[in-house]
Amino acid sequence: MTSTKRSITLTPSWKAFFWQYALGILLTPVLIGIYILWRTRKTHASIRYKISDQKITVVDGHISQNIDLVDIRKAISGETQFGVGPVTIRTSGREIELVGLENPAQIARSIEKAVEAELKRLEAQKQTKPRETKYGPGEMDRLDYLTGLWQQGLISNEDFDKEQQKFKKD
């Protein structure tokens, strides 16, 4: 069974950093505003959220955190300002906030649907049984060797049938 892994990368909206940008613009004549703008832009550009079929990767600067979808207990959208808000992901051991996402309620619902789908996939995978082989390890090689001897005429038909019966399972 082949599976194609799908993923999407989200970045925070500039609206999440509105007040920092506004402060930087207001303080530009004092020169500290340039530093505030630079720092805000650097922070804004360093945050990424990669959501795939099996996990969520949160990258914040040089720090990267992975959350398996099966570990997620709840995804909650926070209050929005300018149409942008956080999504809080709760696992059994920690809580991570994805900041600055547009339509956080929709993203939280999508994450919860992805968690349900991953749990169903894992359950279906547990229920599938491996196929039983007809022959034990090494028996196919011995049967091929026997067939080669028979085809070359080195053993008779009766000997071939007699030896072949040893490989058949009931």
Image: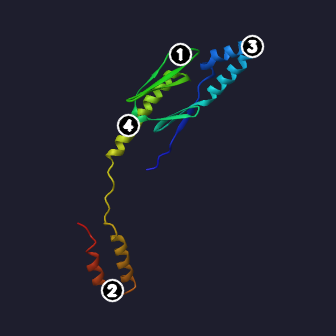
Amino acid beneath label 4: Leu
What numbered label is drawn on residue 41? Answer: none
Q: Earlier in the sequence, mark 2 or mark 4?
A: 4
Percent position of residue 156, x then y: 31, 86
Amino acid beneath label 2: Ile
Label 4, on which residue? 119
Q: In the image, is residue 89 above or below residue 128?
A: above
Seen at 53% across and 38% down, the residue is: 7
Query: Tag 2's secondary structure?
Result: loop
Seen at 55% across and 35% down, the residue is: 8
Q: In the image, is residue 149 above or below residue 74?
A: below
Q: In the image, is residue 64 above or below residue 134?
A: above
Q: Residues within 10 Å of mark 3 (few under 14, many from 20)?
A: few
| Residue furthest to the right | 29
Q: Quadrant of residue 91?
A: top left
Q: Are marks 3 and 4 in contact (CB under 8 Å)?
A: no
Query: Tag 4's secondary structure?
Result: helix
Percent position of residue 35, x then y: 70, 21
Percent position of residue 26, x then y: 71, 12
Q: Residues within 10 Å of mark 1 (few under 14, many from 20)?
A: some
Q: Earlier in the sequence, mark 3 or mark 4?
A: 3
The answer to whether 20 appears left or right of 57 in the picture is right
Label 3, on which residue? 30
Closest to the observer, 89 or 111: 89
Label 1, on which residue? 80
Label 2, on which residue? 155
Percent position of residue 134, x then y: 31, 64
Give the CA distance from mark 3 to mark 2.
Answer: 99 Å
